[in-house]
Image (tube, helix red, strand yellow):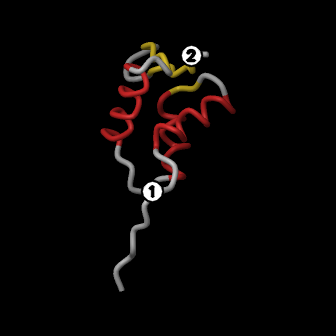
Amino acid sequence: MPTVKIWKIRPGFFIVLEILNKKGDMIDDDLYSQLKEEFEDLGYKDFNDILMRLEVSGKIRTTSMSRGKRRVELIQ
């Protein structure tokens, strides 16, 4: 029997904002794993799209730390 996918009530960008509000600044890999617990079928490209939308809208700031790592912080 095929699995039935159910649409989530809360969008991904809202959950990212909730996680950052609770935990504070995070590394993007840690944030991705937190978000992956809520959305099992979330890909890294979709995660980057969410981060880009939030950064363009002025909700978060991402800064490059080392090779392949970014720090994601909530703008108050």
Few, some or many residues within 10 Å of mark 2 (<14, 14–19, 20+): few
The quadrant holding residue 6 is: bottom left
Give the secondary structure at mark 2: loop
Q: Looking at the figure, which quarter contains the C terminus?
A: top right
Q: Residue at x 42, y 14 (%)?
A: 64
Q: Position of residue 41 (x, y in %)?
A: 39, 56
Q: Secondary structure at mark 1?
A: loop
Q: Quadrant of residue 45?
A: top left
Q: Residue at coordinates 60% horizontally, 22% vertically from top-left?
A: 25
Residue at the (38%, 18%) spot, across then down: 67
Looking at the rendered image, the quarter that the N terminus falls into is: bottom left
Which mark, residue 17?
none
Q: Position of residue 34 (x, y in %)?
A: 56, 43
Choose top left, top right, bottom left or bottom right for residue 49.
Answer: top left
Which numbered mark, 1 or 2, is in the foreground of this view? 2
Left or right, 47 with respect to 32, comes to left
| Residue 43, x across and y down, in percent | 35, 46
Q: Amino acid at mark 1?
A: Glu
| 3 up-or-down from 8: above or below | below
Q: Which residue is mark 1?
A: 40
Amino acid carrying mark 2 in the image = Ile
Q: Earlier in the sequence, mark 1 or mark 2?
A: 1
Looking at this view, is 54 or 69 the one in front? 54
* Distance (Cα) linking label 1 and label 2: 27 Å
Residue 13: give x, y in percent of width and height. 47, 37
Of 4 and 27, which appears nearest the observer? 4
Residue bearing mark 2 = 75
Q: Residue at x 65, y 29 (%)?
A: 21
Reply above or below: 65 against 19.
Answer: above
Bin the neighbour count of mark 1 within 10 Å (Cα to Cα): few under 14, some 14-19, many 20 and up: few
